[in-house]
Amino acid sequence: MPKEVKYAGFWIRFFASFLDTLFVALPIGIIVYFVSDGNWFDFAQYQQNIQLAMSGNPHALDTQPQTSFTWELVFEFSLLLVTIIFWNRWQGATPGKRFFNIKIVDATTYKEITNKQAITRSLAYIPSLLLFGIGFFMVALRKDKRGLHDFIARTAVIYDQKPHAQS
C-alpha cells in the first residue's frame, strides 16, 4: 500500500477524460468512420440537424441520423482495446490520466488493476451515466472520490506517487 493515498477528485478526472476523448476516442472514431466508408452514421443528417437548430427550428431533432450498430460495436470494442493497452502499458493510466499524474488502481490493494477490472470498469460507465450521470458525480461527493463504476470494478483513481520513466 502506498505511504499516503491521495484520491483524484472530480475535476482532475473530468479534464483527464476530456484529454482522452480528444486524443484517443476522437482519432479512433475518425478511423472507424472512414473504414466504414461513412456507413457508421449519417453525417449529412447531423449537419442538417445542426443547421436547423442554429436557425431556431424547434423540430431540429425530430429526425435522428441512422447509425450502424455493427460499426458502433467496432468503435466501442476498439476504444476498449486501446484503453486496456494504455492501462497495461502505463500501470492504470490513459494519456489524460498520465498527463495529470493520476492512475487507476485496485481499491483494496492499491496495486495495478487486472484486465477483468479494466473491462468491468469500462462497461460500468453505462450505469454511471444513467440517471443523469449520478454515478460520475458521486466522485465529487465522496471522501474516497469513487464513482459507481469504481465500486462495480473495485477500483480507485489516485495520484501516482512515482515519476514516470520515459516510454
Image: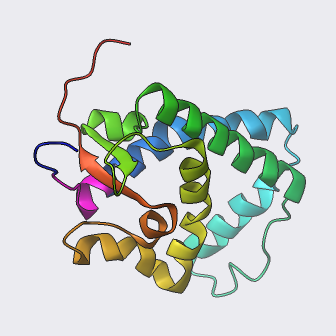
- In this rendering, does residue 141 appear at all? yes
Location of the N terminus by quadrant is: top left
Q: Residue at x 49, y 46 (%)?
A: 21
**Residues in magenta, as a range:** 6-13
Q: State the image coordinates of residue 53 (x, y, percent, origin top left).
A: 60, 74
Q: Is residue 12 left or right of residue 154?
A: left
Residue 49 to residue 1: above or below: below
Observer-nearest residue: 63 or 97? 97
Q: How many marks?
A: 0
Residue in view at x 24 percent, y 78 percent: 141
Q: Position of residue 161 (x, y in %)?
A: 17, 35
At 44% across and 61% down in the image, what residue appears?
A: 154
Q: Is residue 68 at all visible to an observer of this figure?
A: no
Depth check: 149 or 105 in front? 105
Please tell me in which quadrant of the rendered image residue 57 appears.
bottom right
Write the residue at 38% across / 47% down.
104
Viewer-proximal residue among 90 and 63: 90
Q: Is residue 129 above or below residue 33?
A: below
Q: Is residue 11 magenta?
A: yes
Quadrant where the image shows the C terminus: top left
Instruction: Please give left or right for residue 63 compared with residue 2 in the image.
Output: right
Q: Position of residue 35 (x, y in %)?
A: 83, 33
Up/down of 61 relative to 91, above or below: below
Identity of the residue furthest to the top in this view: 166
The image's colouring method is rainbow
Instruction: Pick out the residue farthest to the left.
Output: 4
Dividing the picture into quarters, in which one does residue 42 lie? Answer: bottom right
Check if residue 70 falls in the magenta segment. no
Q: Residue 81, percent across and down? A: 66, 38
